[in-house]
Image: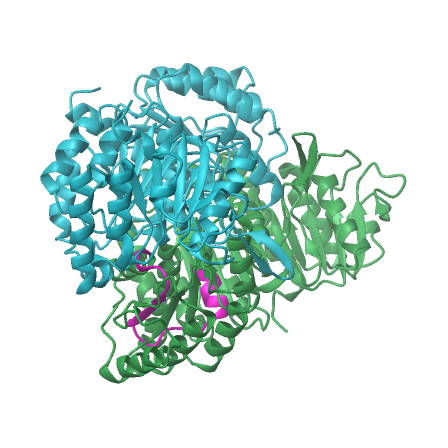
Chain colours: A cyan, B green
Amino acid sequence: MGQLDPFFYPDSVAVIGASREPGSVGHELLRVMVENKEKGLYRGRLYAVNPRATEPILGVPTYKSVSELPEAVDLGVVVVPARIVPAVLEECGSKGIKYVIVISGGFAEVGGEGVKLQEELIRVAKKHGIRVVGPNCVGVVCPETGVDTMFLPYSKEIGGRLLPSLPRPGPGNISLLTQSGAFGVACVDYMAGEGLGLAKFVSYGNKADVDEVELMEYLADDPKTRVIVIYAESIEEGRRFVEAARRTVPKKPVVVLKAGRTSAGARAASSHTAALAGTDEVYSAAFKQSGIVRVYEVEELFDVTKALSMQPPARGRRVAVLTDGGGAGVMTADELESRGAEVVPLSSETRAKLEALMREGIIPPISSVANPVDVTGSATDDAFVEALKVLVEAPEVDGIIVLPLHHVPGLTSDLPNRIAEVAKKGNKPVLVADIGQGAYGVAFRERFDELGVPAYPTPERAARAMVGLIKYGEALKRLGAL
Amino acid sequence: MGQLDPFFYPDSVAVIGASREPGSVGHELLRVMVENKEKGLYRGRLYAVNPRATEPILGVPTYKSVSELPEAVDLGVVVVPARIVPAVLEECGSKGIKYVIVISGGFAEVGGEGVKLQEELIRVAKKHGIRVVGPNCVGVVCPETGVDTMFLPYSKEIGGRLLPSLPRPGPGNISLLTQSGAFGVACVDYMAGEGLGLAKFVSYGNKADVDEVELMEYLADDPKTRVIVIYAESIEEGRRFVEAARRTVPKKPVVVLKAGRTSAGARAASSHTAALAGTDEVYSAAFKQSGIVRVYEVEELFDVTKALSMQPPARGRRVAVLTDGGGAGVMTADELESRGAEVVPLSSETRAKLEALMREGIIPPISSVANPVDVTGSATDDAFVEALKVLVEAPEVDGIIVLPLHHVPGLTSDLPNRIAEVAKKGNKPVLVADIGQGAYGVAFRERFDELGVPAYPTPERAARAMVGLIKYGEALKRLGAL
């Protein structure tokens, strides 16, 4: 059992500062927990605290103060104004509550009085041995247990319809740590829409106590987490971070998006978080040393993470491309090579096997058996499957990008299943790309995703994801773990 | 009236090599034209030619030979085997048919005998003054007139459902020229799914006669085309291309994705098209000289094109960012600066106006009025609208990226309308980014798109689109047109 377990696996939760006012943070946060309890997601006990309470809020037993709660809850979630947070923490300490998420803002991030308030918060927490996530954060989301402190509106009206404006992802193996709450919220929405599953989400805000390093180490040993994603604008304790990453990376990949990488970005970041962002070269060197897979964009973040969450690392940088569209093959090769991967010619043995398939009429006679292998618009499911088998067995190939552009008449919806079966037998990563935003293309790619073969809507996005798998393989080798 | 008009605006079309066999090219192509006629999209006359015809195919009057056709059609579409294409062209010539699309493959792209067949095709076409698109192509799509020779299956089965596998975009102002048919097909599907409208699409294949240069010049004067997009793997007549582009760019932007930019890609491209791809430096220099906006990826291609199709070029590289999420603002600044745009501090006049808005309570008191302008999670529609008005009027700002992350409680579905209204009043580009793939986020961005303010699902994609607008502005200045 990990030290931070109660943040994710509490048997009892109290929302301190719960409100009857729809739209307020203290109301919306409680509402999410109530709904998760009704849905059977959150199975623990739930309480609310409000000094003016006379009856239950949203049907939840509500108390006038923390001290009146019927038990020392596993987890307190604090949404009261900043200036009374230290007093509330005192009460929590006296009550014996040891884990608290402070949602409230108005601390170090606003400077002046806020800095002092945060110091006071830290002092009280230390005195009582309370572990604190926050302040100034959106807290925790754990789809496995229904713990969810994301207090923003779940749906909003547009065009006369009420649509989910902040859907939550289902349970999965990706965990996300974020310094920016707003970006964390956006990521949760992004993951939900893309069908990416979430293990644990923590917006750690001002990290007055629990920080990204401790969370990373916790997730390193979390059996539900296969990939750790971190969004950071500043990392103050660089040495601790690097050491934690070096211990974590051999167990699972750590993907970091460090914003503020340019001077304009760094200036914006320091005005945003009041922390010095540091020079980007220092971060780059530290990340490389610790085996972190660094990404530079939101889309790349999730594309690489999706690949790492489903496929093994690449044991080298030699990639084979298998396509039914010559142009898409060229673009894949371009992006791979421009990012340091190698699209090397295939060995004569591999070529001979592919040529045999051609003679047998399994792959079309006009196919190209160079790399990219182009089975052309006359390709069938069989052509892709048999050519992929050859590439999976080729010792000169470390990873494969398959581009079964779905438009050609010979490809059917059986292909995802058959490709996934072949991919599973090898010990090298297989990624898919297919272009087209129409309904079939979207469904075709979803099918691959569901089968554990990550699919992307452009050749370049698949290529970048493959580069992520290569980088993780290289990190493992550097750390002696592959 | 342009020289190539009959390819897009024919009053009569004959499908030569039409077939009764579902799934065959000659059947599917005719079917698309028949359906477009039934839908009232194609309003001209339609004929079929099949040597074994005894009765109509798909209800279309069918003749045993071209010479038996009741008129010299404006456009012939040829789908017969390569070896009889020259003879069919002879017949077309005798009949007086002057515009022909040759879909059939088996020419220069296969080498050997195919090269000779293509020479013969050219000889016959020249003799009769026939203009030819192709061979080895998927031809033309013109949503305005319903001319559509894209013969691939329109729908396919997946998960027990028949879904559109190759939907067509509606009419719009983007025209697309492509050397690769398969990539062209994929682009049409991509545009349809993304809601991007199409003016004219031409897959020119082996360009035995009509090539990308002549098509570009035709589109330069096409009133329906606002942006010309070209996908090319090889450009043989560089000087002609550059000169045509220099004449075209002052009228409308030309966006080029030149595949084969790395050695691996170039090797793949030359095995694909049998054309020398040329060194990338030469292409880069030529593109720059001619004012072409060069892009490197599929997604960037359409992101930049969407911006150019809706917004004016930027008159300089100074970009302001307006956000309700600090992190997203930082990422936007990072991507802009890393691609050569400038995220400069705002002038004291502009800051004073924003500070006044803060004092009046229109933008939240904790806002940052540096660049990015961060109106925080407490932002309202009013905050965005009034701050945007200030930025649109600021002389030190050439373009604006607005990031109204939709999750915050204060933003409503009125915002797209209001932002579009302010954006229209300025003479500088305004782009939007909002993160989240859930239903509301998708609908929110679609609303912006419909109002002519291009919206993107990540900060970086909006930043790259802005860089495209900056590059077009710079090209216009270099060519003395801005």
**The image quarter in which residue A148 lies:** top left
User: Horizontal placement of B153 versus B472: left or right?
Assistant: right
Number of marks drawn:
0
Name the one closer to the observer, A127 or A348. A127
Name the one closer to the observer, A392 or B10. A392
Q: Quadrant of the C terminus of chain B?
A: bottom left
Q: Quadrant of the N terminus of chain B?
A: bottom right
The image shows residue B77, relative to residue B332, as above or below, that is above
Residue A231: where, in percent of width, then height?
A: 28, 45
Q: Is residue A103 magenta?
A: no
Residue A260: where, in percent of width, then height?
A: 22, 55
**The image quarter in which residue B470 lies:** bottom left
Residue A262: where, in percent of width, then height?
A: 20, 57
The image shows residue B29, relative to residue A251, as above or below, that is below
* Residue B334 in sight here: no
What residue lies at 84% left-to-right and 46% top-to-bottom?
B63
**Which segment is the magenta one?**
B304-327
**The image quarter in which residue A228 lies:** top left
The single residue placed furthest to the right in the displayed view is B55
Q: Is residue B319 magenta?
A: yes
